[in-house]
Image: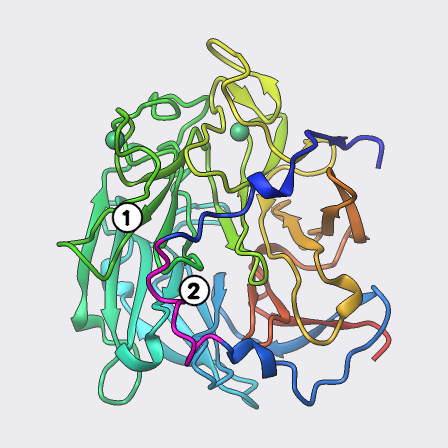
Amino acid sequence: MSPFRLLLTLLSSTLILPLAGCPSDDDDTTDDDDADVCAGIEPVSGTDVDKQLIGAGLDRPVDIANAADGSNRVFVVEQTGVIRELRAGDTQARRWFDINDRVVNPGGMGDERGMLAMAFHPDFADNGKFYVHYSDSSGDTTVSEFTTDADGAGDPDSERVLFTVDQPASNHNGGSIKFGPDGYLYIGLGDGGAADDAFGNGQNPDSMLAKILRIDVDNGSPYGIPSDNPFLADPVIDEAFMWGMRNPWRFSFDRQTGQLWVADVGQNRTEEIDIGLAGANFGWPNKEGSDCYQGPCDDSFEDPIFEYSHAQGISISGGYVYRGCKMPDLHGNYFFSDFPYAPSSPLWTIKNNGGSFGPGDVWIGNWGILIATFGEDEQGELLTADYDGGDLYRMVPASR
Ligand SMILES: [Ca+2]
Ligand SMILES: [Ca+2]
């Protein structure tokens, strides 16, 4: 593990997302669901994981989600603009939503455009609302709300556009959209692409690009700004939650602590993992990882909690902190991978080892598939997909 530099001892108390003003999780009648989520599931001791095939025939799977509605369905976003649904017991995923007609046709492997992510509204079971992040027919970023139709499928005709952003190049569109434990929608956008922040968005306070945004989809038109967003009294756009990102392709929330984990794809030298910190500037392009890169470089920039060099990988695929039922010995491990453009992605974890983050309990150099993304099922078991082979997997105890 010596090639990996372990960075920054961070007090966990400074890292937890502010939960003040929590609009959707303050109701005692609904927030005790997690208590029985593991009922009837036998835990398995040990930290060896294997992959169990649970679906096949997917076309470039880039995101995996669950509706948290008790249905135990798994949803897979295909880059071409389709969302497929895998019901409990299914082996073949069904077409659930299709906006291929308004999504740019992604080219070959490594094309970063297309439908990139989806998020279910926290009250999806009641209101049928979900959100998608896609590149439109011109390649520009669109984040929209949709609702389900009478049959419970996603309705392409229900689109309510939240915003669009011009994309000056095909790469670095960011990707993830997810609701935080505060009920707000977080959206990751990259720097606009090309290389070396060619369009100057990394430290541009006026642009929606190169940021993690945080908006309120339940108030305002087309959306509201949460009253505790960190840049309301600052030149940085009010939607921003953190900035100075290069290409935050995948982020997630720890379902136990609420902590935000962002994997920011690097330039030619370093891949990084950042912890959510309201108002932080993560430094791109002045810094790549913890190294100065271009422009003025000082302590005002937030450094990653973990980084690895391009001797180990070339494009980080962020994952999740494991909080599932089956493998309690792996709780607290943050799973992630890398996208080597071949079916040889690693499966790595890091965890907090007494104040700093270092390699965790799983460290597999080649897992035999090409990993662009991870997901959680309703029990918090981790899912991943083979971008090239189109297979969907659940991580299971190797000793089962
Ligand atoms: Ca502002
Ligand atoms: Ca950075």
- Who is closer to the viewer here, 50 or 276? 276
Task: Judge the density around disc 1: few (<14), some (14-19), many (≥20) Cα neighbours within 10 Å.
Answer: some
The quadrant in which the N terminus is found is top right
Q: Which mark is residue 241?
A: none
Label 2 CB less than 8 angstroms from ligand 2: no
Q: Position of residue 257 (x, y in %)?
A: 58, 57
Residue 55 x/y as whole percent: 58, 78
Report if residue 31 is visible in the image.
yes
Mark 2: few, some, or many residues within 10 Å (few <14, many ≥20)?
Answer: many
Q: Is residue 199 above or below residue 277?
A: above
Q: Which residue is mark 1?
A: 226
The answer to whether residue 364 is seen in the rendering is: no
Residue at 65 percent of width and 66 percent of height: 323
Q: Position of residue 269 (x, y in %)?
A: 63, 25
Which of marks 1 and 2 precedes in the sequence? 2
Distance between mark 2 and mark 1 Cα atoms = 31 Å
Outermost front residue: 28
Secondary structure at numbered mark 1: loop
* Residue 304 percent coordinates (x, y): 60, 32
Q: Nearer the viewer, residue 206 or 174?
A: 206
* Tag count: 2
Q: Is residue 68 above or below residue 99?
A: below
Identity, as a three-letter code, of the amino acid under mark 2 = Glu
Image check: 398 left or right of 97? right
Is disc 2 in contact with disc 1, using a CB cutoff of under 8 Å? no
Q: Badge 2 is on which residue?
A: 78
